[in-house]
Amino acid sequence: MSACFPIAEKTFRDPQGRLYGEGNRIFREVYPQHSAPVLDWLRSPLAQRWIRQGRMASTTIVDAEPGHPILLEHEPIFFPTYPWEWPPSQWMAAASLTLGLCEEAVEEGFILKDATPLNILFSGSRAVFVDVLSFERRDPHSPLWIAYAQFVRTFLLPLAAYAYLGWPLSATQQRRDGYEPADLAPFLPILSRWRDPLRSLVTLPLLLQHMSRFTAARPRVSEDVASFALRRLLQSARKSLHALTPAARASRWSSYPERAQHYQAADREAKQAFVRSALRGMSPSHVLDVGANTGTYSRIAAECGAEVVAWDTDVQAADLNWRAAHSAALPILPLVADFARPTPAAGWQNLESASLLDRARGKFDCVLMLGILHHLLVADQIPLAAILEQLRELSNRWAILEWIPKEDSQFNGLCRGRQELYNHMNEGYFIHELSKRFLLCGHAQLANGRSLWLVERI
């Protein structure tokens, strides 16, 4: 959900109702046959407490006339995301919230009936459960958590594939219902398969899969035994999740701010001072940081009062950015996202999940593009005019850009012997193309030859 969330036209997957948007407002219609349990849940002290805590989407009952569909209104979350755009630590946070809510629900006589990352959005660095129809009264005599298998498929097995096999979490875009144990098993060493958490997540389920041919009646036990069994199952799930905590990994870009030789301390200080001064002058509510790396400038924007969405192609850099933002409770949402290859629309008829650009277009008061233009121009081979056009679509008003001259060591390194292709790429050409689309409002020249530009959309 967002301030103007592009709701998917196809919400047929929810048998209880449909979600739709009208302007800046988000509504959910619940069909009459499902109205009583939904109202029971939303009016419960537990649901109301989670809403106050910001752990569940704020929801207002607009209309609840007996015999008619219930109409609910959800408070919008600024920038909607999908799990395939999250760095690993966000996956862990989403899984932990899902388990935590289920644990509390069991104690209050409710249970979570589906458990997928698609039930989670992030408000800044904070995970929020948004599918308010996912809870119901539990059978006090049943020891089963029916959604456990889905939690394993959509949370634990993707995390296991990432941790043990190096499979990217972004690959889950093609696996709506997650992974099966048989998907991982052929690629895992035999010894690893017999150690937890893989033994309980992969090996034992494969050994027992033939038993699933037989349909058995759901067990019914005493209330105490049922509660005990559910608690143990949830504890086991949390233990598996903890065991899958990704180890810290270095990448080419995750330590870039500390080891960048082409930046002296004075250059960094001057760059940060220019960006801070510009942001304070414009006071933007929403900032997009393109090529955010580990978040130095995302944090400056947040300190200036903005809610920030930070895109970077490097998984580890985005993960470090999210950890820092989450630890400091900053309104920063880091994503693994590529300005040059934005996340496409997905799902049935490409209507279930909106593309990255559709979600971002016109949402930001200011866009930061610092240390990224040369990558787009040379590595991605995107013409400058096209880059600036896309920037203009994403920004409602302001942008701050860093120009990297072709003599710069980083520019040269990307050229790989093709320097002659970029002979025209000088600052005069940059200013000429920029001036067609933006007013030049501020400029700073750094000692290392790079320059900073504050511009306003024409």
Image (cartoon, grey):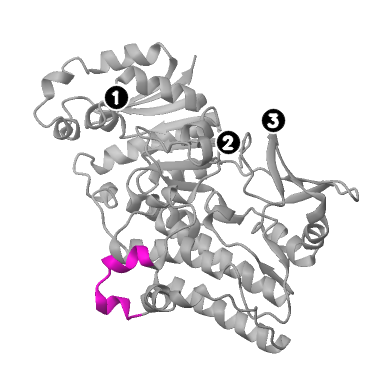
Asked where in the image residue 127 lies, by quadrant, the reply is bottom right
Type of amino acid at the residue the image marks with label 1: Ile
Labels 2 and 1 touching (C-beta < 8 A): no
Q: Which residue is mark 3?
A: 23
Residue 285, label in figure: 2
Query: Outermost residue toward the front?
Result: 214
Q: Which residue is mark 1?
A: 382
Q: Which residues are magenta?
A: 182-195
Residue 380 screen position, x and y as percent: 26, 30
Which comes before the other along the chain, label 2 or label 1?
A: 2
Residue 360 screen position, x and y as percent: 51, 33
Q: Is residue 189 magenta?
A: yes
Residue 216, label in figure: none
Residue 250 screen position, x and y as percent: 26, 57
- The answer to whether residue 297 of the structure is visible from this angle is no
Mark 2 residue element = loop
Asked where in the image residue 131 lies, by quadrant, the reply is bottom right
- The answer to whether residue 347 of the structure is visible from this angle is yes
Q: Is residue 123 left or right of residue 451?
A: right
Name the residue: 26% across, 26% down: 377
Residues at marks 3 and 1, CA–CA distance in whole angstroms? 34 Å
Q: Nearer the viewer, residue 55 or 448?
A: 55
Residues at marks 2 and 1, CA–CA distance in whole angstroms? 29 Å
Name the residue: 24% across, 73% down: 189
Which comes before the other along the chain, label 3 or label 1?
A: 3
Disc count in the image?
A: 3
Q: Nearer the viewer, residue 406 or 349?
A: 349
Type of amino acid at the residue the image marks with label 3: Gly
Residue 318 screen position, x and y as percent: 38, 50
